[in-house]
Image (cartoon, grey):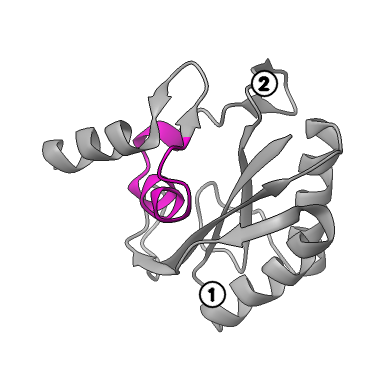
Amino acid sequence: MKAVVALGSNLENRKLNLDIAITHLEVLLQDLKVSPYIETKPVGGPTQNDFINAVALGICNLKPEILLAELLKIEDQMGRVRNVKWGPRIIDLDLIVYGDQVVDTVFLKLPHPFAQSREFVLKPWLAIDPEGVIPGVGKVKSLLASIQSSS
């Protein structure tokens, strides 16, 4: 199944944090592609440093709930602290899409409910997957164009 994972960091050495997270993703996803890194302003939450964001995609044979649990484990291993919603973080790994699956549980929502409105997800995703689609929502290219034209 094709998995799309968004990465972000705005604490310490942001680029190194993404590099480390990607080495962990290489274990979970085959044929891994990683977008160029982009610097973005924080969305929501308290005043904080800018982020570096990227998107990774690859093939995964785990169930989506297991993949999400593995992503959370990577965040924990890297020292992610969750004390402020949308606050600063050493690493953030979000499962955006898993094939064409639609899931709505307490633990997992697929596709990610905010992905379609987040330029920091769509822009790097488009760079490595020009035909990318958010199931039930639309093409990444069209969603990004819509966001950019309204800002």
Q: Position of residue 96 (x, y in %)?
A: 58, 38
Residue hosting label 1: 11
Secondary structure mostly seen in the magenta stretch: helix
* Secondary structure category for the residue under label 2: loop
In-front residue for pair 70/131: 131
Q: Is residue 99 above or below residue 124?
A: above
Q: Is residue 87 toward the left or the right of residue 78 in the image?
A: left
Q: How many labels sit on residues?
A: 2
Q: Give the residue displayed 40% in from the left and 48% down from the top.
A: 126
Taking the image as shown, residue 70 lies to the left or right of residue 80, namely right
Percent position (x, y) of residue 118?
A: 37, 42
Q: At 79% from the left edge and 60% from the top edge, which residue is drawn?
A: 74
In the displayed structure image, the side of residue 50 where residue 9 appears, left or right: right
State the image coordinates of residue 88 (x, y, percent, origin top left). Answer: 52, 63
Residue 77: quadrant of the picture: bottom right
Q: Give the residue type at disc 1.
A: Leu
Indicate the amino acid at tag 2: Gln
Instruction: Residue 24: give its label.
Output: none
Boundaries of the magenta span: 115-132
Checking the image for residue 101, the label placed there is 2
Q: Nearer the viewer, residue 45 or 135?
A: 135
Q: Nearer the viewer, mark 1 or mark 2?
A: 2
